[in-house]
Protein backbone atom coordinates (compact mmCIF):
# COMPACT_ATOMS: atom_id res chain seq x y z
CA UNK A 1 0.00 0.00 0.00
CA UNK A 2 1.29 3.47 -0.88
CA UNK A 3 0.49 6.59 1.11
CA UNK A 4 1.35 10.21 0.37
CA UNK A 5 1.60 12.57 3.35
CA UNK A 6 0.91 16.23 2.56
CA UNK A 7 2.42 18.21 5.43
CA UNK A 8 1.96 22.03 5.33
CA UNK A 9 5.19 22.95 7.11
CA UNK A 10 8.92 22.69 6.56
CA UNK A 11 9.46 19.15 7.77
CA UNK A 12 12.55 18.83 9.92
CA UNK A 13 15.17 16.39 8.73
CA UNK A 14 18.26 14.90 10.35
CA UNK A 15 16.74 14.77 13.84
CA UNK A 16 17.78 11.18 14.51
CA UNK A 17 20.84 12.13 16.54
CA UNK A 18 19.03 14.77 18.59
CA UNK A 19 16.16 12.37 19.31
CA UNK A 20 18.56 9.56 20.25
CA UNK A 21 20.40 11.95 22.57
CA UNK A 22 17.12 13.01 24.18
CA UNK A 23 17.35 16.61 22.95
CA UNK A 24 14.31 16.78 20.69
CA UNK A 25 10.82 15.22 20.61
CA UNK A 26 9.75 13.02 17.72
CA UNK A 27 7.74 14.99 15.15
CA UNK A 28 4.25 13.64 14.58
CA UNK A 29 4.64 13.26 10.83
CA UNK A 30 7.77 11.18 11.42
CA UNK A 31 5.88 9.02 13.91
CA UNK A 32 3.08 8.47 11.39
CA UNK A 33 5.52 7.68 8.57
CA UNK A 34 7.40 5.24 10.82
CA UNK A 35 4.18 3.50 11.88
CA UNK A 36 3.13 3.05 8.27
CA UNK A 37 6.55 1.86 7.12
CA UNK A 38 6.56 -0.71 9.92
CA UNK A 39 3.72 -2.50 8.13
CA UNK A 40 5.09 -5.03 5.61
CA UNK A 41 4.50 -3.86 2.06
CA UNK A 42 3.65 -0.25 2.96
CA UNK A 43 5.41 2.63 1.21
CA UNK A 44 5.26 6.26 2.35
CA UNK A 45 6.23 9.51 0.66
CA UNK A 46 6.02 13.01 2.11
CA UNK A 47 5.56 16.41 0.49
CA UNK A 48 6.27 19.48 2.64
CA UNK A 49 6.68 23.19 1.91
CA UNK A 50 10.27 22.65 0.84
CA UNK A 51 9.13 20.19 -1.83
CA UNK A 52 6.49 22.68 -2.98
CA UNK A 53 9.01 25.52 -3.20
CA UNK A 54 11.44 23.45 -5.27
CA UNK A 55 8.86 21.85 -7.57
CA UNK A 56 9.49 22.69 -11.24
CA UNK A 57 6.15 21.75 -12.79
CA UNK A 58 4.68 24.90 -14.43
CA UNK A 59 1.20 24.36 -12.98
CA UNK A 60 2.56 24.04 -9.47
CA UNK A 61 4.78 27.09 -9.94
CA UNK A 62 1.75 29.07 -11.11
CA UNK A 63 -0.38 27.86 -8.20
CA UNK A 64 2.40 28.77 -5.77
CA UNK A 65 2.62 32.26 -7.24
CA UNK A 66 -1.11 32.95 -7.43
CA UNK A 67 -2.59 31.01 -4.51
CA UNK A 68 0.23 30.14 -2.11
CA UNK A 69 1.95 27.04 -0.80
CA UNK A 70 -1.11 25.20 0.49
CA UNK A 71 -2.98 25.24 -2.83
CA UNK A 72 0.24 24.34 -4.63
CA UNK A 73 0.71 21.41 -2.24
CA UNK A 74 -2.86 20.26 -2.85
CA UNK A 75 -2.22 20.40 -6.58
CA UNK A 76 0.95 18.31 -6.20
CA UNK A 77 -1.04 15.70 -4.30
CA UNK A 78 -3.79 15.74 -6.92
CA UNK A 79 -1.32 15.34 -9.78
CA UNK A 80 0.18 12.28 -8.04
CA UNK A 81 -3.16 10.77 -6.99
CA UNK A 82 -2.94 7.76 -9.31
CA UNK A 83 0.36 6.70 -7.75
CA UNK A 84 -1.09 6.24 -4.26
CA UNK A 85 -3.80 4.31 -2.45
CA UNK A 86 -4.26 7.03 0.21
CA UNK A 87 -3.61 10.76 0.46
CA UNK A 88 -3.21 12.16 3.97
CA UNK A 89 -3.59 15.87 4.75
CA UNK A 90 -3.10 17.16 8.27
CA UNK A 91 -4.92 20.48 7.97
CA UNK A 92 -7.91 22.02 6.17
CA UNK A 93 -5.73 24.54 4.34
CA UNK A 94 -4.54 21.65 2.15
CA UNK A 95 -7.48 19.26 2.54
CA UNK A 96 -10.09 21.68 1.17
CA UNK A 97 -8.33 22.66 -2.07
CA UNK A 98 -7.39 19.01 -2.57
CA UNK A 99 -11.05 18.00 -2.09
CA UNK A 100 -12.11 20.58 -4.68
CA UNK A 101 -9.67 19.06 -7.17
CA UNK A 102 -10.71 15.50 -6.36
CA UNK A 103 -14.32 16.49 -6.98
CA UNK A 104 -13.45 16.93 -10.68
CA UNK A 105 -12.48 13.28 -11.28
CA UNK A 106 -14.51 10.07 -11.27
CA UNK A 107 -11.98 7.96 -9.39
CA UNK A 108 -9.76 9.03 -6.56
CA UNK A 109 -7.59 7.51 -3.83
CA UNK A 110 -8.70 7.35 -0.22
CA UNK A 111 -8.39 10.75 1.51
CA UNK A 112 -7.76 10.95 5.27
CA UNK A 113 -7.52 14.37 6.89
CA UNK A 114 -7.38 16.24 10.19
CA UNK A 115 -9.76 19.16 10.68
CA UNK A 116 -8.50 21.41 13.44
CA UNK A 117 -11.28 23.99 13.20
CA UNK A 118 -14.36 23.58 11.01
CA UNK A 119 -16.36 26.45 12.48
CA UNK A 120 -15.04 29.62 10.71
CA UNK A 121 -17.81 31.04 8.53
CA UNK A 122 -15.60 31.21 5.45
CA UNK A 123 -15.18 27.42 5.55
CA UNK A 124 -18.82 26.49 6.15
CA UNK A 125 -20.12 26.89 2.54
CA UNK A 126 -17.39 24.54 1.37
CA UNK A 127 -18.94 21.81 3.48
CA UNK A 128 -22.62 22.77 3.49
CA UNK A 129 -23.00 23.82 -0.16
CA UNK A 130 -20.15 22.17 -2.06
CA UNK A 131 -20.18 19.14 0.24
CA UNK A 132 -16.42 18.76 0.00
CA UNK A 133 -16.57 16.28 2.87
CA UNK A 134 -17.66 13.75 0.24
CA UNK A 135 -14.04 13.82 -0.97
CA UNK A 136 -12.80 13.01 2.55
CA UNK A 137 -13.20 9.43 3.74
CA UNK A 138 -12.13 10.08 7.33
CA UNK A 139 -12.08 13.46 9.05
CA UNK A 140 -10.29 13.47 12.40
CA UNK A 141 -11.24 16.16 14.91
CA UNK A 142 -9.65 16.94 18.27
CA UNK A 143 -12.65 18.60 19.94
CA UNK A 144 -16.14 17.27 20.64
CA UNK A 145 -17.43 20.80 20.02
CA UNK A 146 -16.03 20.66 16.49
CA UNK A 147 -17.45 17.19 15.94
CA UNK A 148 -20.91 18.29 17.05
CA UNK A 149 -20.76 21.36 14.82
CA UNK A 150 -19.66 19.21 11.89
CA UNK A 151 -22.71 16.98 12.28
CA UNK A 152 -25.36 19.50 13.36
CA UNK A 153 -24.38 22.57 11.32
CA UNK A 154 -22.26 21.40 8.41
CA UNK A 155 -24.18 18.22 7.70
CA UNK A 156 -21.12 15.98 7.68
CA UNK A 157 -22.18 12.35 8.23
CA UNK A 158 -21.10 11.10 11.65
CA UNK A 159 -19.50 8.00 10.13
CA UNK A 160 -16.91 10.17 8.37
CA UNK A 161 -15.83 11.82 11.65
CA UNK A 162 -13.49 10.43 14.27
CA UNK A 163 -12.91 12.25 17.55
CA UNK A 164 -9.42 11.57 18.92
CA UNK A 165 -7.17 13.23 21.48
CA UNK A 166 -4.20 15.28 20.31
CA UNK A 167 -0.78 13.95 21.30
CA UNK A 168 2.48 14.53 23.13
CA UNK A 169 5.75 12.62 22.85
CA UNK A 170 5.58 11.02 26.29
CA UNK A 171 9.11 9.68 25.94
CA UNK A 172 10.56 13.17 25.59
CA UNK A 173 8.10 15.02 27.81
CA UNK A 174 8.29 12.96 30.98
CA UNK A 175 8.86 13.53 34.70
CA UNK A 176 12.52 14.36 35.34
CA UNK A 177 13.56 13.36 38.85
CA UNK A 178 17.01 14.90 38.32
CA UNK A 179 15.49 18.39 38.11
CA UNK A 180 14.73 20.23 41.34
CA UNK A 181 11.20 21.60 41.44
CA UNK A 182 10.89 25.25 42.42
CA UNK A 183 7.74 25.54 44.47
CA UNK A 184 7.62 29.30 43.86
CA UNK A 185 7.62 28.93 40.04
CA UNK A 186 4.84 28.23 37.56
CA UNK A 187 4.95 28.30 33.78
CA UNK A 188 2.94 28.47 30.59
CA UNK A 189 3.72 28.13 26.89
CA UNK A 190 2.31 28.90 23.45
CA UNK A 191 0.46 31.76 21.73
CA UNK A 192 -2.72 30.37 20.17
CA UNK A 193 -5.69 32.13 21.79
CA UNK A 194 -3.65 32.71 24.97
CA UNK A 195 -5.20 35.05 27.51
CA UNK A 196 -1.93 36.10 29.08
CA UNK A 197 -3.31 39.52 30.12
CA UNK A 198 -5.77 37.85 32.53
CA UNK A 199 -3.07 35.58 33.94
CA UNK A 200 -0.66 38.49 34.42
CA UNK A 201 -3.32 40.50 36.21
CA UNK A 202 -4.06 37.51 38.44
CA UNK A 203 -0.42 37.17 39.57
CA UNK A 204 0.46 40.88 39.57
CA UNK A 205 0.56 41.11 43.37
CA UNK A 206 2.07 37.66 43.97
CA UNK A 207 5.62 38.97 43.87
CA UNK A 208 6.94 35.84 45.60
CA UNK A 209 5.82 33.76 42.61
CA UNK A 210 8.03 33.44 39.54
CA UNK A 211 5.93 33.17 36.37
CA UNK A 212 7.73 31.95 33.26
CA UNK A 213 5.99 32.26 29.89
CA UNK A 214 7.35 30.43 26.83
CA UNK A 215 5.38 32.82 24.65
CA UNK A 216 6.09 31.41 21.20
CA UNK A 217 4.50 28.98 18.75
CA UNK A 218 5.48 27.85 15.24
CA UNK A 219 1.79 27.37 14.33
CA UNK A 220 -0.06 30.33 15.82
CA UNK A 221 -1.21 33.25 13.69
CA UNK A 222 -2.01 35.26 16.81
CA UNK A 223 0.15 38.17 17.85
CA UNK A 224 2.31 37.94 20.95
CA UNK A 225 0.46 40.06 23.52
CA UNK A 226 3.34 39.98 26.00
CA UNK A 227 6.02 41.01 23.51
CA UNK A 228 5.44 44.75 23.85
CA UNK A 229 3.81 44.71 27.27
CA UNK A 230 5.59 45.97 30.37
CA UNK A 231 5.66 42.91 32.61
CA UNK A 232 5.94 42.79 36.40
CA UNK A 233 9.48 41.96 37.57
CA UNK A 234 8.46 38.43 38.59
CA UNK A 235 6.95 37.61 35.15
CA UNK A 236 9.30 36.66 32.34
CA UNK A 237 8.35 35.93 28.70
CA UNK A 238 10.73 34.61 26.05
CA UNK A 239 11.30 31.81 23.57
CA UNK A 240 12.51 28.38 24.65
CA UNK A 241 13.93 25.55 22.57
CA UNK A 242 12.47 22.08 23.01
CA UNK A 243 14.97 20.91 25.61
CA UNK A 244 14.85 24.20 27.51
CA UNK A 245 11.06 24.08 27.50
CA UNK A 246 11.13 20.60 29.00
CA UNK A 247 13.48 21.84 31.70
CA UNK A 248 11.08 24.73 32.37
CA UNK A 249 8.16 22.35 32.81
CA UNK A 250 10.24 20.14 35.11
CA UNK A 251 11.36 23.06 37.28
CA UNK A 252 7.88 24.48 37.68
CA UNK A 253 5.50 23.57 40.45
CA UNK A 254 2.60 23.35 38.00
CA UNK A 255 1.54 24.49 34.52
CA UNK A 256 -1.07 27.12 33.64
CA UNK A 257 -2.82 27.55 30.28
CA UNK A 258 -4.91 30.75 30.12
CA UNK A 259 -7.20 30.90 27.08
CA UNK A 260 -9.65 33.26 25.48
CA UNK A 261 -13.05 31.75 24.81
CA UNK A 262 -12.92 29.61 21.66
CA UNK A 263 -14.55 26.56 20.13
CA UNK A 264 -11.60 24.28 19.33
CA UNK A 265 -8.61 22.71 21.08
CA UNK A 266 -6.48 25.83 21.44
CA UNK A 267 -3.83 25.26 24.09
CA UNK A 268 -3.84 21.48 23.76
CA UNK A 269 -0.12 21.12 23.00
CA UNK A 270 0.91 22.86 26.23
CA UNK A 271 -1.77 21.04 28.23
CA UNK A 272 -0.61 17.61 27.07
CA UNK A 273 3.08 18.42 27.43
CA UNK A 274 2.46 19.55 31.01
CA UNK A 275 0.44 16.41 31.71
CA UNK A 276 3.18 14.24 30.19
CA UNK A 277 5.66 15.89 32.57
CA UNK A 278 3.49 14.72 35.47
CA UNK A 279 2.45 18.26 36.34
CA UNK A 280 -0.86 19.54 37.64
CA UNK A 281 -2.40 21.79 34.99
CA UNK A 282 -4.82 24.70 35.36
CA UNK A 283 -6.60 25.58 32.12
CA UNK A 284 -9.37 27.93 31.07
CA UNK A 285 -12.52 25.91 30.48
CA UNK A 286 -13.62 27.02 27.01
CA UNK A 287 -16.26 25.67 24.64
CA UNK A 288 -13.62 23.79 22.69
CA UNK A 289 -11.27 22.85 25.51
CA UNK A 290 -13.27 20.33 27.53
CA UNK A 291 -12.25 16.87 26.33
CA UNK A 292 -8.97 16.30 28.18
CA UNK A 293 -9.04 17.81 31.65
CA UNK A 294 -11.52 16.33 34.10
CA UNK A 295 -11.91 18.94 36.81
CA UNK A 296 -10.44 17.87 40.16
CA UNK A 297 -9.23 14.55 38.70
CA UNK A 298 -6.36 15.27 36.29
CA UNK A 299 -6.36 19.07 36.38
CA UNK A 300 -8.35 22.18 37.23
CA UNK A 301 -10.58 24.45 35.16
CA UNK A 302 -11.14 28.18 35.61
CA UNK A 303 -13.75 30.39 33.96
CA UNK A 304 -12.75 32.38 30.85
CA UNK A 305 -11.50 35.86 31.68
CA UNK A 306 -11.86 35.42 35.45
CA UNK A 307 -8.96 36.96 37.36
CA UNK A 308 -10.53 35.79 40.62
CA UNK A 309 -10.76 32.18 39.44
CA UNK A 310 -7.12 32.20 38.43
CA UNK A 311 -6.05 33.67 41.75
CA UNK A 312 -8.00 31.05 43.70
CA UNK A 313 -6.77 28.10 41.60
CA UNK A 314 -3.12 29.21 41.73
CA UNK A 315 -3.29 29.80 45.47
CA UNK A 316 -4.91 26.42 46.00
CA UNK A 317 -2.20 24.50 44.16
CA UNK A 318 0.58 26.50 45.78
CA UNK A 319 -0.75 25.61 49.21
CA UNK A 320 -1.58 21.93 48.59
CA UNK A 321 1.38 19.74 47.56
CA UNK A 322 -0.71 16.58 47.93
CA UNK A 323 -3.25 17.87 45.42
CA UNK A 324 -0.49 18.89 43.01
CA UNK A 325 1.02 15.43 43.17
CA UNK A 326 -2.30 13.60 42.74
CA UNK A 327 -3.37 15.73 39.78
CA UNK A 328 0.05 15.39 38.19
CA UNK A 329 0.11 11.61 38.51
CA UNK A 330 -3.42 11.30 37.16
CA UNK A 331 -2.48 13.62 34.30
CA UNK A 332 0.50 11.47 33.33
CA UNK A 333 -1.64 8.35 33.58
CA UNK A 334 -4.39 9.81 31.39
CA UNK A 335 -1.86 10.83 28.77
CA UNK A 336 -0.18 7.42 28.72
CA UNK A 337 -3.54 5.75 28.22
CA UNK A 338 -5.05 8.16 25.72
CA UNK A 339 -2.77 10.71 24.08
CA UNK A 340 0.68 9.38 23.35
CA UNK A 341 2.24 9.93 19.94
CA UNK A 342 2.00 6.17 19.39
CA UNK A 343 -1.72 6.12 20.13
CA UNK A 344 -2.29 9.01 17.71
CA UNK A 345 -0.29 7.27 14.99
CA UNK A 346 -2.28 4.04 15.52
CA UNK A 347 -5.52 5.92 14.93
CA UNK A 348 -4.26 7.44 11.70
CA UNK A 349 -2.75 4.20 10.42
CA UNK A 350 -6.09 2.48 11.00
CA UNK A 351 -7.85 5.17 8.97
CA UNK A 352 -5.31 4.99 6.17
CA UNK A 353 -5.85 1.21 5.99
CA UNK A 354 -9.63 1.52 6.47
CA UNK A 355 -9.80 -0.63 9.56
CA UNK A 356 -10.94 -0.09 13.15
CA UNK A 357 -8.56 0.83 15.94
CA UNK A 358 -8.46 -0.51 19.49
CA UNK A 359 -10.71 1.48 21.87
CA UNK A 360 -9.23 4.16 24.11
CA UNK A 361 -8.55 2.86 27.60
CA UNK A 362 -10.86 3.83 30.42
CA UNK A 363 -9.88 6.53 32.88
CA UNK A 364 -8.46 5.16 36.13
CA UNK A 365 -7.99 8.02 38.57
CA UNK A 366 -5.58 7.87 41.43
CA UNK A 367 -7.30 8.65 44.68
CA UNK A 368 -4.22 8.10 46.82
CA UNK A 369 -0.83 9.74 46.50
CA UNK A 370 0.78 6.33 47.03
CA UNK A 371 0.19 5.08 43.48
CA UNK A 372 2.83 5.59 40.82
CA UNK A 373 2.57 6.19 37.07
CA UNK A 374 1.23 3.53 34.75
CA UNK A 375 3.79 1.63 32.70
CA UNK A 376 3.54 -0.93 29.94
CA UNK A 377 1.77 1.32 27.45
CA UNK A 378 1.41 -0.39 24.07
CA UNK A 379 4.09 0.85 21.64
CA UNK A 380 3.68 0.77 17.86
CA UNK A 381 6.13 3.35 16.52
CA UNK A 382 9.62 2.00 16.07
CA UNK A 383 12.90 3.84 16.59
CA UNK A 384 11.82 6.01 19.53
CA UNK A 385 14.15 6.66 22.43
CA UNK A 386 13.92 4.48 25.55
CA UNK A 387 12.91 6.20 28.76
CA UNK A 388 15.84 6.34 31.20
CA UNK A 389 14.90 4.16 34.14
CA UNK A 390 16.10 6.68 36.71
CA UNK A 391 13.74 9.36 35.36
CA UNK A 392 10.54 7.37 34.87
CA UNK A 393 8.84 8.61 37.98
CA UNK A 394 6.86 11.65 39.00
CA UNK A 395 8.97 14.21 40.81
CA UNK A 396 7.34 15.52 43.93
CA UNK A 397 6.07 19.06 43.33
Image: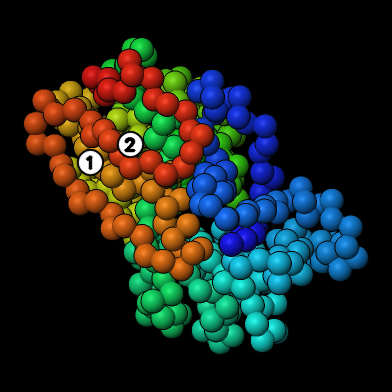
Q: Is residue 62 left or right of residue 141?
A: right
Q: Are marks 2 and 1 in contact (CB under 8 Å)?
A: yes
Residue 213, how many percent across, how many down? 47, 30
Q: Residue at x 25, y 38 (%)?
A: 333
Report which quarter residue 212 is drawn in. Answer: top left
Q: How many marks?
A: 2
Q: Is residue 366 left or right of residue 59?
A: left
Q: Earlier in the sequence, mark 2 or mark 1?
A: 2
For residue 70, above or below residue 374: below
Q: CA distance from mark 2 to mark 1?
A: 8 Å
Residue 345, how many percent across, how many down? 46, 50
Query: Which corner quadrant holds the N terminus?
Result: bottom right
Regarding residue 316, the answer to whether it shows in the image is: no
Density class for disc 1 (Cα within 10 Å; few <14, some 14-19, many ≥20) is many
For residue 132, above or below residue 286: below
Residue 261, how many percent across, how many down? 39, 56
Q: Residue at x 55, y 28 (%)?
A: 19
Regarding residue 397, the answer to whether it shows in the image is: yes
For residue 316, above or below residue 114: above
- The residue at which mark 2 appears reads as 275
- The residue at which mark 1 appears reads as 298
Residue 291, how many percent across, how many down? 30, 55
334 or 251, which lies in front?
A: 334
Q: Is residue 14 left or right of residue 294?
A: right
Amino acid sequence: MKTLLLIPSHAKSGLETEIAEDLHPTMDYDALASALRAIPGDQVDLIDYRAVETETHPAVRMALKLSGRDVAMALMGFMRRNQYDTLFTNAENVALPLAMLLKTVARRPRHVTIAHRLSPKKKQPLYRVLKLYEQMDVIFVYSSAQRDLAIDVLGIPAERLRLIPFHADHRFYRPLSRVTVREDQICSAGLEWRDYPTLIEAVAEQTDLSVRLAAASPWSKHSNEVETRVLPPHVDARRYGYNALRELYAQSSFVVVPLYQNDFQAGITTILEGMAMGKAVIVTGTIGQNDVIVHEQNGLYVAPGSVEDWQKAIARLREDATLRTRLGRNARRWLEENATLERWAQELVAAVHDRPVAPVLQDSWEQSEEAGPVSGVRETVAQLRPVPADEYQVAEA
